[in-house]
Image: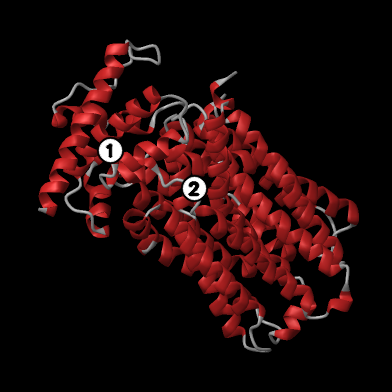
Amino acid sequence: MAPYMTKTAVYNWYASMVAAGCMVLYGYDASVFNATQGSKNWVNYFGNPTTTQIGTINSVYIVGNIVAGWFFSAPVSTYFGRRVAMAVGCALVVIATFVQTFAPRGHLGAFLGGRFIVGLGQGMALPVGPVYISEIARSEIRGKVLAFWQLFYSVGSFIAFWIAYATARHPELGEWDWKLIVIFQALCPAIIISLIFFLPESPRWYVQKGRIDDARAALRRFRDTEEEVETEILEMREAMEYEAQQTKGTSIWQVYKQLWVDKSLRWRMFLALVINAGQQLTGQGSLNSYSTVIYKKVFTSASTISLINALNATFGILFTLNAAWLVERIGRKWLLAGGAAGQAICMLIVALVGTLTPGGTSKSEPVGISIVFLLFLFILFYKPTWGATVWIWTSEVFSMNVRSYAVGAASQTQNVANIIVNQFFPQLIAAASFKSFFLFFGINIFLFFFVFFLVPETKGVRLEEMDTLFGGVNHINAGADILGAQSTFSGDIDKAAPAEHRENLHALNEVSEDKASQEKASNKV
């Protein structure tokens, strides 16, 4: 039986899928307003909001996301653990759901407040999910597991748009046609809260806190043999010993300073910021928030538009599955480059079809179907590449001492880019119609060349070895020198290493733990 089909590997997948549920929140929350603004009852309930107010409703959600992602998610995750950060984020989303659903009639500010709290919850939970997954997954399946992170975004969109389609088919619901869409966003976070504390905490977080026994117990639930556990524990300790010497303090400002001072980290941060911003600038961010507005230029039936959105989300799930089998075969770099090329072609053809066919803002049905097909084709390219692979690459390239902060900061550039696009896109699509897609064509061409020439491949590289890929110091070797022990990192050491090597690992860990126990006893005295 293959190693990845063992009992511990199945549990590894289960724990990863619970954490990936945070992305269901994101997919649902990012789609829910797109779905609700198609409801005439919602428009009437809040006094027919202007296009500027529509943009603000999308933007305030992203502002909350940025605030929590930059300033709260990483500190909470670092000091209290990955599970606590995810649970707090989910709890905020549940609270915000009821604030939005039961906002008083005509009080758009209350609805805006709920959207801001949703953003806070998302900003707290989202950066932590992929970090937790990357820290518990084996290196050979890490990309496959993380591919489901983006898949769950599509699951969230799927649920939101199909609920919207169902409510659009029942006009007798009245105002509850949009309230049902909103209130269902409390379901997934409630499930995550009920499950998350039954999972082990990240073994790497335990090691960082000096809780070696807890780290070993957690890792045993994800690895098959004691040899794997002991080797990985020792590598973590060696790497973190070096990282602790490099990071002068643990405050948020000191960690962010390290991201700027260290040349290797600074380069990784630059690459991560660009590709994360690029994820939303491909055109996906606007399609996800304003597909209803786009389709209104072609179709007049609200139920037809809801059906198209629901089908788009359904196919998004199927398309994202491609990442699970492609990411460890052709690698992260070529998925990103190929995706950008395919997306550019789709955006170019949409712009040409929309501008060169007769009808102005009222297209014929065949033209409308062609545009829908092209946007579905865009999703085929986007989901397994810039949708899934950006998260995979970002969550695995940073060392443990800065990982939560770096992933949180990098992922928030998605929201910075999104808030800019969401604010001006309603006016752009109203003024330029389908010519606005030429903008996304140009952005995707830029992203293709950026990835092709600058982004390195990370397929199969262990987390503790990632620094060497970017010209940095090998943290395992450097930490081993500090600990005064022989490093376990060697291209010649494999799973068939001599028994003496494994005994040395056990002996070294036992000595270290005995010393730690003696220090604790001394402190108590």
> The N terminus appears in which quarter of the rendering?
top right
Q: Quick check: 370 left or right of 469? A: right
The three-letter code of the residue at mark 1 reads Ser
Q: Is residue 409 above or below residue 244?
A: below
Q: Position of residue 34 (x, y in %)?
A: 69, 66
* Front tag of 1 and 2: 2
| Residue 374 locus on image (x, y percent) | 75, 46
Q: Which residue is mark 1?
A: 264
Residue 427 image offset from top left, x and y in percent: 63, 70
Picture colour scheme: secondary structure
Q: Is residue 389 left or right of residue 469?
A: right
The residue under the point 18% across, 41% down is: 516
Question: Residues at badges 1 and 2 in contact (C-beta under 8 Å)?
Answer: no
Can you tell which quarter of the image residue 290 is in?
A: bottom right
**Few, some or many residues within 10 Å of mark 2 (<14, 14–19, 20+):** some
Residue receiving disc 2: 199
Q: Helix or strand or loop: what does disc 2 sit on?
A: loop
Which sits in the foreground, 368 or 508?
508
Q: Is residue 160 something one can see in this rendering? A: yes
Q: Nearer the viewer, residue 47 or 177?
A: 177
Label 1 SS: helix
Which residue is at 56% across, 49% downward?
A: 18
Q: Residue at x 58, y 83 (%)?
A: 110
Q: Is residue 66 above or below residue 275?
A: below
